Amino acid sequence: MIKSRIQIIIMTMFVFIGLVSAEPEVEEIIMNMDELYRSSSSYVEMEMQISTPHWERTLSLEAWSMGMDKTFILINSPKKEKGMATLRIDNEMWNYLPKTDKVMKIPPSMMMSSWMGSDFTNDDLVSETSMLNDYSYKFITPDDARDGLIYVELIPDKDLAIVWGKIILAVRENDYLPVKQEFYDEKSKLMRIMNFKDIKEIGGKTLPTVLEVIPQNKEGSKTVIKYNKAQFDIKLDNAIFSLRNLKKGK
């Protein structure tokens, strides 16, 4: 990632002095996606609405993160799930179940499994993978391309436990904010769509405050996350990201 940052700085200097044209750099777009909801540290309050043809429920969540390496998520409601929590430190992840007072370690093979019955995966919520470091990427122009959008195709590294065969990312041309992601399996079959909506300023950053995931293999199902409050680049106690705190549910 450090190397990519240096490359972007050098290219920006070249653009400034007129040595290259001011075309967008694909690394800049991907790095923006990696850091959009994180920064050096963050705290957010959000709601997750899970809908299926047979039932619907809404979770109230708090989440803390430190860089790309540490994440802590706490469920505050409804009563049935209150106190359940998720912790990730580097490549390790745990869930805490208050009813049984047990901490369960999540193996790498389950990072693409559903998080709390939603259409988001464990990896979506704690962002174990980095688009910049774990994928190869290039600009593309799909048949259904829309004016004002830039499209990037991402292919995961073969040695990583990622179920997606490829991801198509669409961002706004003027500010690189995401509009949509399409996730395909290894046979290029569309498996789910993630829409980014309601762009506004929150916590001093302008970003989509609503994320909608629609699985293509479960008719009538979707999961929506709404960001209600956010703080970025704040001082956090490192003790938040510990197994001891995971069991406390604080």
Image (tube, rainbow, N blue to C red):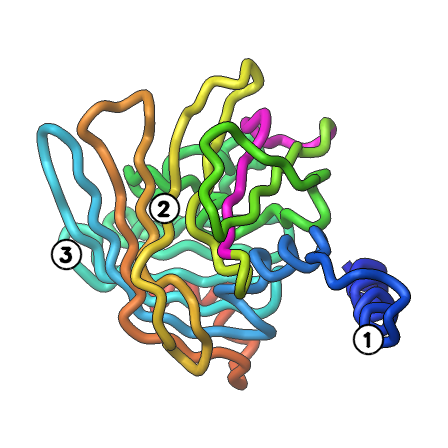
Which amino acid type corresponds to the residue marked 3 in the rendered image? Pro
Q: Which residue is painted at 48% across and 73% down in the image?
A: 42
Please report whichever mark, 1 or 3, sits nearer to the chain's N-terminal start.
1
Compare residues 227 and 99 and report the one nearer the observer: 227
Q: Quadrant of residue 200?
A: bottom left
Q: Which residue is painted at 48% across and 32% down in the image?
A: 183
Q: CA distance from mark 2 to mark 3?
A: 25 Å
Q: Which residue is mark 1?
A: 16
- In the image, residue 165 lies in the stretch drawn in magenta: yes
Q: Which residue is mark 3?
A: 78
Element marked by disc 3: loop
Does 82 sit left or right of 202 as displayed? left
How far across and down, in percent of the image, does residue 11 sit? 83, 65
Which amino acid type corresponds to the residue marked 2 in the rendered image? Asn
- In the image, residue 55 lies in the stretch drawn in magenta: no
Region of the chain picked out in magenta, as a range: 159-172
Q: Is residue 61 visible?
A: no
Q: Which residue is painted at 82% across and 69% down in the image?
A: 15
Element marked by disc 2: strand
Q: Is residue 15 above or below residue 212?
A: below
Element marked by disc 1: helix
Q: Please state which of the two labelled residues, at mark 1 or mark 3, is closer to the viewer.
A: 1
Please report whichever mark, 2 or 3, sits nearer to the chain's N-terminal start.
3
What is the quadrant of the N terminus in the image? bottom right
Q: Is residue 68 above or below residue 234?
A: above
What is the quadrant of the C terminus in the image? bottom left
Q: Is residue 36 above or below residue 26?
A: below
Q: Please state which of the two labelled residues, at mark 2 or mark 3, is closer to the viewer.
A: 2
Which amino acid type corresponds to the residue marked 1 in the rendered image? Phe
Q: CA distance from mark 1 to mark 3?
A: 53 Å
Q: Which residue is mark 2?
A: 195
Compare residues 80 and 220 and report the one nearer the observer: 220
